[in-house]
Amino acid sequence: MSFIAEKFSEIAPSQTLAITAAAKKMRDEGIDVASFGAGEPDLDTPQHIKDAAIEALQEGKTKYTPATGIAELKEALAAKLLVDNGIEYEPSQISINCGAKHSCYNAILACCDPEDEVIIPAPYWTSYPEMVRLAGAEPYVIETKRENGWKLTADEFEEAISGRTKMLILNSPNNPTGAVYSQEELEAIVEVAASEDILILSDEIYEKLIYNEKKHISTAALSEEAKALTITVNGFSKVYAMTGWRLGYTAAPAEIAKAISIIQSHTTSNPTSFAQYGALAALQGDQGMITDMVEEYDMRRQYMMSRLQKINNIEIVEPEGAFYFLVDTTKIGLNSMNLTEKLLSRYQVAAVPGAAFGYDMSVRLSYATSLDVIKKGLDRFEEFCHAH
Ligand SMILES: *Cc1c(COP(=O)(O)O)cnc(C)c1O
């Protein structure tokens, strides 16, 4: 017999772990691995943010805070959401959580019952289906099409709806595809959601990492109707290079915000006190670092585009946000675990297998790494593709 809860029987361990472990082992043996595996910025957290957290520690801000976060940070977030995103939220509708991953999980837990279905467009961020299962609900995955830029269409969404559908998870800009939804595309999706009373969890963590003068559109900003059925999720990890700080937030209709606050009060109590003061400094300080960071990522993105476009047995869609390329390797014909294993063992290139994102014939290449590593890695990747 097993003491492990039944609901865990369906929860898969992270598929990216095997490759990460193998790459680390090779590096420890002194092998020069070029890694496209990064899921986080390759910069350090800016100094003024660190300083604010250190100061908070030294001032003794080391105790519990309100469950959903300190008032100053919630007010600053309400102002940010209004100015940057065009959405009017009361601070009471905002909940600061231990990372945007936690924000997503809280939102799913607050809204989904065991019989509920949650629609997840694939390729998806690897944790969504497992979070839905952990919450006891059922993920319903729809494969989007490369021809549509890996974006869910309103028609595909409508077709996937059943009597049990409770929520749709949208992620724009997208990890792993870099897809950015336009206002028209989002409006069409919201129209379907509104007519069927389906919630939208809108994960906007990459909102500022956006290229080609594309504009990020927040789902909740589209209309009052959209706002009433949207839970906006965002965080500090990607845009301020604060992954280890574990701070994200939800902004939601009052009733949902209240449920999230109750869940949080009984589970984590509150996000880390002094980390919140760092986040406050991030919002209030100079935002110039973001422009510099986006310029740097864009330079790498364009370089990778120009190289990848020349390889004839792979397909890519130009990513317009985040810091990833999803390379469609259908023509190579290996499943993504075999492909990434071979790529690592024979060509010393680490990449994340598409199976982790619900699209097996692909690999994800991250450009949150230096141009030198990118150049070296692409030389090798090109050789691999030519040999297949
Ligand atoms: C990185 C990431 C997150 C979560 O980041 P946190 O570090 O938990 O704030 C959420 N969604 C997507 C799509 C991500 O890539």
Image (cartoon, grey):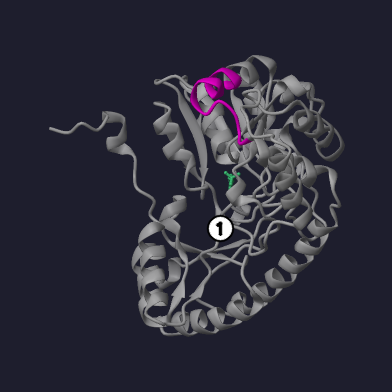
Decide if ligand 1 comes within 8 Å of the CB at mark 1: yes
For the point 54% across and 48% down, which residue is it?
144
Image quadrant assignment for residue 343: bottom left
Judge whether residue 86 is colored magenta: no
Image quadrant assignment for residue 176: bottom right
Q: Nearer the viewer, residue 127 or 119?
A: 127
Residue type (three-letter) at the residue carrying disc 1: Gly
* Residue identifier under label 1: 39
SS majority, magenta: helix
For the point 67% across and 77% down, which residue is it?
306
Residue segment shown in magenta: 260-272
For the point 80% across and 28% down, which residue is it?
75
Q: From what the image shows, is residue 138 above or below residue 322? A: above
Kind of element beneath mark 1:
loop
For the view shown, which residue lies furthest in the left direction? 1
**x%, y% of residue 93?**
71, 22
Query: Which part of the image, by quadrant, shows the N terminus?
Result: top left
Q: Nearer the viewer, residue 14 or 174?
A: 14
Judged left or right of residue 333, residue 86 is right
For the view shown, which residue lies furthest in the top direction? 255
